């Protein structure tokens, strides 16, 4: 009878696989967002409405499942990266705020969300998460982080004039520094998690741009449809492999 009262974890464990899947999900979300707004030429407002509707449906499912479900969780991550792409582009191109102001606004919103999370819950943790209220904070922070990462990545390429490859190298170096700080310093691990989460967004996005943008703009000129299918297939394979490996490890323990 007591097992019915156990609150089960709802989110992915922070491992190397987590970050690999995060980067791929980011790449997938970037290309999906561009597919709606640019390839289908729907515009940023209509594209945002479509992607927000998708994200709401997936998040409702995610919030209702009783325990961590890898497929649903990573669909939600892809949804936040796609919506994040549309939010960033809407702020820059439709509202005319520019990526610098957009980044500042999103950064302020993220800080405020983390402040409320810490104040209301007496701390912040990203794993495990068992309570619905904490999970809501988690997904709001993830959406804002992905939106901020998109705006910052676009700032590097559009405002600073960096090529997609150079932008990926810059953000990759930042991620490497965060990894080193994680292993060799006592800096707050939650702070490092959110820094890494933000910068894996532009890293994945610039990688997506590298695949899909024209050769004249420093890209490899792959079609968005083909690149999206490749990213989706790769993400599915890694989810399957990591779940199988975790199940094998648990069976060996038992």
Image (cartoon, rainbow, N blue to C red):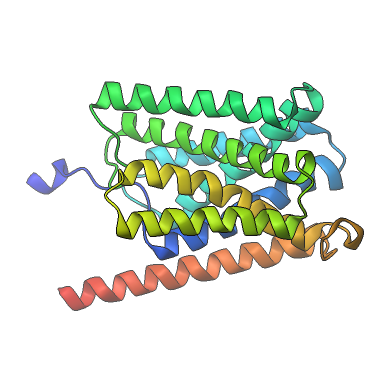
Q: Quadrant of residue 154?
A: top right
Residue 66 showing in the rendered view: no
Q: Is residue 139 above or below residue 157?
A: above
Total tally of numbered discs in the picture:
0
Residue 13 falls left or right of residue 143: left
Q: Quadrant of residue 131?
A: top left
Q: Residue furthest right?
A: 216
Q: Is residue 170 above or below residue 95?
A: below
Residue at (41%, 58%) from the top-left corner? 179
Residue 22 falls left or right of residue 136: right
Q: Residue 5's x, y, as percent?
A: 14, 41
Name the image quarter holding the C terminus.
bottom left
Residue at (62%, 31%) from the top-left corner? 103
Residue at (43%, 65%) from the top-left corner? 17
Q: Nearer the viewer, residue 233 or 101?
A: 101
Residue 218 showing in the rendered view: yes
Q: Residue 217's x, y, as percent?
A: 87, 55
Q: Residue 202's x, y, as percent?
A: 62, 48
Q: Nearer the viewer, residue 215 or 15?
A: 215
Residue 217 falls left or right of residue 20: right
């Amino acid at each position: 009878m007591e097992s019915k009262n156990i609150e089960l974890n709802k989110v992915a464990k922070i491992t190397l696989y987590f970050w690999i899947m995060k980067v791929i999900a980011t790449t997938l979300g970037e290309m999906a967002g561009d597919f709606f707004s640019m390839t289908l030429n729907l515009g940023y407002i209509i594209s945002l409405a479509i992607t927000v509707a998708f994200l709401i449906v997936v998040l409702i499912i995610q919030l209702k499942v009783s325990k961590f479900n890898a497929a649903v969780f990573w669909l939600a991550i892809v949804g936040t990266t796609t919506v994040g792409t549309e939010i960033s582009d809407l702020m820059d191109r439709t509202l005319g705020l520019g990526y610098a102001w957009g980044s500042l606004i999103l950064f302020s919103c993220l800080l405020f969300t983390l402040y409320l999370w810490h104040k209301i819950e007496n701390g912040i943790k990203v794993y495990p998460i068992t309570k619905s209220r904490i999970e809501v904070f988690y997904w709001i922070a993830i959406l804002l982080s992905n939106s901020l990462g998109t705006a910052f990545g676009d700032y590097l390429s559009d405002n600073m004039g960096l090529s997609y490859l150079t932008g990926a190298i810059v953000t990759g170096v930042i991620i490497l520094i965060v990894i080193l700080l994680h292993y060799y310093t006592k800096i707050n691990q939650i702070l490092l998690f959110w820094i890494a989460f933000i910068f894996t967004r532009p890293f994945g996005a610039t990688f997506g741009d590298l695949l899909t943008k024209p050769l004249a703009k420093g890209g490899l000129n792959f079609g968005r449809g083909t690149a999206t299918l490749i990213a989706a297939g790769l993400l599915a394979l890694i989810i399957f492999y990591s779940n199988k490996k975790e199940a094998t490890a648990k069976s060996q323990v038992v």
